[in-house]
Structures are given as C-alpha cells and as structure tokens.
Image (cartoon, rainbow, N blue to C red):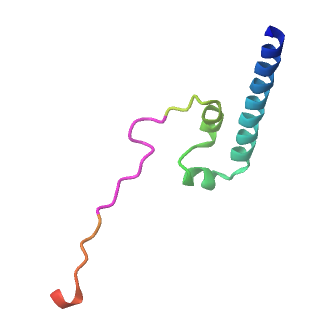
Amino acid sequence: MFVLNLFVSAREAFADWRRRERAYAELMALDDHSLADIGIHRSQVRDLCEGRYAPTPGAATAPARRPRKLVSPRAV
C-alpha cells in the first residue's frame, strides 16, 4: 500500500509540474503588451506559475469608476 501511495503522489507531482510548465510557456509566448493588459510583467511570470506571486499593495488594481447619474431628456 505504501508503494502504491508513493507512485500516486509521484504521478500527481509530475502532473502538477507539467501544468505549471505549460502555463509558463503560454504566458512567455505572449508579447509584453498582452502581459501588461493582464497586469503582470515578464519577470513575474515564473513566480506567478509557481504560486509565489505577491503583488505590491495598491499596484495591481485600477481605480473604480463612479457610475454616472443618468438624466432623462425631459429633466433638462
């Protein structure tokens, strides 16, 4: 039973590693403009794929827009 658990754990670890490598390859295939559109720099891709990415406070979010009040044409 122990050997079976070892093989299952090894297979899951390998599958997880392949998943991270595939994500890394896909993100690195994007150009810098596309990466900037999703809010990351090329130097952050490896950390993002490995789960170690921690954005700096306040840097990753865009300010929210206030909804404009709609005025009916009759009120003007």
Residue 43 appears anywhere in the view = yes
In magenta segment, residue 58: yes
Q: Which residue extends farthest bottom?
A: 74
**Quadrant of residue 41 within the rendered picture:** top right
* Image x and y of residue 14, in percent: 79, 26
Say left or right for 55 vs 3: left
- When the figure is inspected, residue 34 is found, relative to residue 5, above or below; the finding is below
Q: Is residue 76 visible?
A: no
Residue 59 is inside the magenta segment: yes
The percent position of residue 57, horizontal first and vertical second, equals 40, 36
Q: Residue at x 61, y 31 (%)?
A: 47
- The x, y position of residue 15, in whole percent, is 77, 31
Left or right, 3 with respect to 26, comes to right
Write down the quadrant of residue 65 in the picture: bottom left
Residue 31 at what x, y percent from top left?
A: 68, 53
Q: Can you tell which quarter of the image residue 70 is in?
A: bottom left
Outermost residue to the left = 75
- Residue at the spot x=71%, y=39% of the render? 24
Q: Residue at x 71, y 44 (%)?
A: 28
State which region is magenta: 55-66
* Image quadrant in which the N terminus is located: top right
